[in-house]
Each structure stands twice: as C-alpha cells, then as structure tokens.
C-alpha cells in the first residue's frame, strides 16, 4: 500500500524517434524514466527506429526491452511521416506486449504522433510528453503546431518538462491547461560527481557539451570564443558534440589560431559526459531555445558554475547562486562569462555544495512517482467512442478538421482490416521480465542505477 491506495501495475510503451545509441536529453529522459518505472513494478518497453545496424529487439539493463523498427529517417534522426504504414507493426508489438498505456515523447517525432493516433484507434490510453519550445511565425513552426494539434486532440494527458514549456504547448495545441502537468527532468546525481581534486588553479576551463545546431546558439559561441580568449589569456575551451555547425567552429579556431586553447572532442557517449565535465570550471550553455536543459543540471552536479541564456524554461532549472544568466546576444554572453570567470578566481562562488544541492532537487524516482500518478488518472478516464473522436478532430480548423477526420476514419478502417487479416489470437504473447521484489511495500533497490547510463544489452 502507498499513501493509503493500492499501487497499480501498468504495461507501458515509450515511443519516440529519439533513443540510444543517440545521446541527448530526450534519450536520457526516456531511458531513466523507464528504469525507475520498472523499479516501481511496471513493465516498460521502448519503440524507436533502427539506428544503423541496431535493429530488431534488444534487452537492456533491468529488463528494458527496446524495439528498433526499420524505418527511414529524413532529418536529425526523425523518421519519414507516413501516418498509416507504422500501424501493422505497432499493433503487433502492442498486442504482443499487452500494453495498457502508450507514452509518446517529442513534438518532432513522427513515430510518437503516429503511435498516439493508432493507440487511440485501438482503444488504448495515450500520454504525451513535450520536451521542446516552438514559435508561431515561421512555416516550420506553423506546420509542427498543426501536427501537434492533430495528435493532442485525442490524447488523454500531456506532460511538459517546465512551466514555460507548458504555456508554449497549451498555446500551440489550444489545450485545456487542466489536462497538462509539469514534471521536470532529473539526473542520476551519483553518475555526475565532482572531481576529487581541485582543477588547475592557473587556468579556467569552459566546457560546452551540445548538439552543434543553430538553435543551440552555436553561432553565438563562434563569435564569443575569440573575444573571451582575447580578454582572458588563461581561459581554455573544451567543446563536445557534433552537427552541421562543427565546420564553422573549426574554421573559427583556425582563423584565430586557437588550436591550443579550443579542444574539440566531437560526439561523445552520455556515460563519458561526467569525465568531460570534471575537466572544467564553468559550463557554458548559449542555447536560443530550451524547454528545460538537463545538461545544465548535470554540469552543476559535477560542481561547475553555469553560464546560460535566459530563454525558455532554463531560469526554472537551477537557483541563481549556481548560474550566471545572459540575454541570447553576443555582448551579454561575453559579459556574463567574464563575470563568472572573475567570480571563480576571486572565490565569490563556492561550487563545493552544488552536487549535494542538485541531488536533493532532482530525482528520477520522484519523476517516476509523479508520472505514475498521471497513469492512474488516465486509466480512470472513460474511453471515447469513434463519433466523439471525430468531433474533437473536426474542431481543429475549417480545412484541417475535415482532413484530420478523414485520417482518423481511414485509420479506423485499417484497424478493422488488421483485426480480420491477423486476429489478436494469432499473435504470440511475449513473456514478461521478472518483476522487482518488494521490500516494505517499496521496490528493491536497483543496483544498476548507479552504473552506466546504457548498461549491458543482449540481442
């Protein structure tokens, strides 16, 4: 019994285009949340697309099963939207694993949107987590927001990783704020411990770990590095990450002859992030848009002072004594970085307490418990009939509403065809991984929690 109620057990399918072996905040969120839900006695599987030769079914740490579906990717590891072609294999997986709740992640994930549509057609509860912020003016944002409106018209509940993200999602998808919850990201603080010894007292090292894309503020970083190096001769940079802006960074380094002061590591594994972090004194995060920023929490947990732009949900992440905020402009970032360098050199900032503070603020166990409450809520909601679903979609716009209704009707007919072509009884049911043992009403401690992020996997 927990808080006077009997804890329910769910079979949950996490669906997103973004998962390991690619590293990033969404990937880490899905993995860590899945692990903690398994610790709490639930069954969790992950459905994503194939990454290179990683396809089929893999069993990872703690019995987390991952389905790598062979689908074509088009941009930044997002699959080609097809609407209906994912339904047959998705239905097969859902029936095989006896899934109760489909939990989709990320606005730019085609698999996520299609999985929620197909899940609702099958009468399965659906939850969506938004990890990003989008605008309202440019063509790409308008298209993305319309797709989000389509998906969330029939979702049971929405989770956002910050209050700013919630406001953005409610406006983009025209949602009732009552059906949107805020549950932040977290970190496994034991995986991000400070260095046992002080860093080089004669130099200040600035760490940047990011995908090298425009929205991550890499253009600001390219202009900032030469100015900081000119103002502070004893400052060095370590940059980890990959993307289309990497060539611009390398050209900047060559142009200003900063090869000995700017080290570029390229793409790194998530389990190596801590080893890079502890080489530095300051973590620089020049992003132009950010819903949360898990890497900021990881940096603070490693004992780094954080310099970041005041955008999106970033101001909600850490207290002000751990951060130096700047506007997303070159001059303000230079000033904020210079202030941080001076604060560390004059010992006005004590970073020795950061790790313990972060450990008390962020916990994946707490995130899992709050997500479990969302599952309890949606499991008690009545299942909508086909006509009510059409009514919801019809309200999405004069032309879009009619198009959405056609898509839902075709999806429904496809579901009927699949039920005839391959009945439920003909699909083998997968055996469940042994559930966690309960100790005093709580799951037994997961020994894998403090090991590497990805752990071992088997085919």
Image (spheres, helix red, strand yellow):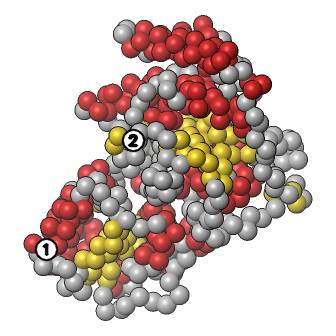
Crowdedness near tag 1: few (<14), some (14–19) or many (≥20) residues, C-alpha within 10 Å = few
* Image quadrant where residue 386 sits: top right
Residue at 74% x, 55% y: name it: 39
Tell me the mark number nearer the camera, choosing from 2 and 1. Answer: 2
- Given residues 104 and 164, the one toward you in this image is 104
* Image location of residue 350, percent across then percent down: 46, 80
Mark count:
2
Disc 2 or 1, which lies upstream in sequence?
2
Check the image and report above or below for 334 versus 67: below
Disc on res. 254: 1
Residue at the disc numbered 2: 73
Crowdedness near tag 2: few (<14), some (14–19) or many (≥20) residues, C-alpha within 10 Å = some
Residue at 44% x, 52% y: name it: 52
Measured in 3D between alpha carbons, the distance from the residue under mark 2 to the one under mark 1, in whole angstroms, is 33 Å
> From the viewer's perspective, is 192 left or right of 109?
right
Residue at 39% x, 34% y: name it: 80
Check the image and report above or below for 198 versus 444: below
The answer to whether residue 159 is visible is no
> From the viewer's perspective, is 70 left or right of 33?
left
Kind of element beneath mark 1: helix
- Given residues 386 and 329, the one toward you in this image is 386
Residue at 15% x, 68% y: name it: 252
Q: Which corner quadrant holds the C terminus?
A: bottom right
In the rendered image, the residue lying farthest to the left is 255
Kind of element beneath mark 2: strand
């Amino acid at each position: 019994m927990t808080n006077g109620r009997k804890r329910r057990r769910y079979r949950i399918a996490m669906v997103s285009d973004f998962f390991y072996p690619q590293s990033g905040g969404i990937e880490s969120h899905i993995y860590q949340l899945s692990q903690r839900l398994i610790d709490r006695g639930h069954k969790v599987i992950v459905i994503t697309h194939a990454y290179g030769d990683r396809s089929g079914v893999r069993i990872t740490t703690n019995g987390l099963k991952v389905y790598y579906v062979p689908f074509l990717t088009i941009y930044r590891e997002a699959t080609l939207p097809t609407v209906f072609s994912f339904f047959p294999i998705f239905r097969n997986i859902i029936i095989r694993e006896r899934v109760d709740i489909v939990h989709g992640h990320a606005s730019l994930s085609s698999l996520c949107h299609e999985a929620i549509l197909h899940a609702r057609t099958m009468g399965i509860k659906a939850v969506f987590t938004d990890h990003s912020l989008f605008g309202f003016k440019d063509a790409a944002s308008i298209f993305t927001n319309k797709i989000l409106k389509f998906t969330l018209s029939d979702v049971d509940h929405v989770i956002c990783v910050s209050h700013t993200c919630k406001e953005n999602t409610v406006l983009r998808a025209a949602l009732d704020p009552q059906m949107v919850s805020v549950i932040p990201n977290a970190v496994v603080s034991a995986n991000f411990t400070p260095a046992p010894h002080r860093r080089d007292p004669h130099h200040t090292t600035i760490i940047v770990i990011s995908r090298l894309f425009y929205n991550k503020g890499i253009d600001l970083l390219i202009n900032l590095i030469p100015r900081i190096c000119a103002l502070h001769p004893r400052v060095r940079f370590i940059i980890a990450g990959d993307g289309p802006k990497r060539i611009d960074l390398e050209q900047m380094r060559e142009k200003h002859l900063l090869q000995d002061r700017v080290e570029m590591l390229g793409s790194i594994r998530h389990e190596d992030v801590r080893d890079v972090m502890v080489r530095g004194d300051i973590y620089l995060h020049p992003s132009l848009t950010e819903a949360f920023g898990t890497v900021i929490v990881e940096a603070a947990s490693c004992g780094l002072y954080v310099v970041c732009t005041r955008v999106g949900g970033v101001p909600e992440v850490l207290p002000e004594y751990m951060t130096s905020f700047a506007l997303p402009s070159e001059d303000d970032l230079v000033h904020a970085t210079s202030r941080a360098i001076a604060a560390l050199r004059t010992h006005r900032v004590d970073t020795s307490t950061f790790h313990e503070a972060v450990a008390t603020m962020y916990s994946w166990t707490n995130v899992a418990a709050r997500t479990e409450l969302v599952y309890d809520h949606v499991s008690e909601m009545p299942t909508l009939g086909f006509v009510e679903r059409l009514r919801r979609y019809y309200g999405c716009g004069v032309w879009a509403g009619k198009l959405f209704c056609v898509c839902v009707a075709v999806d429904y007919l496809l579901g009927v065809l699949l039920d005839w072509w391959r009945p439920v009884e003909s699909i083998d049911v997968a055996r469940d991984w042994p559930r966690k043992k309960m100790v005093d009403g709580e799951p037994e401690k997961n020994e894998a929690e403090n090991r590497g992020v990805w752990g071992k996997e088997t085919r």
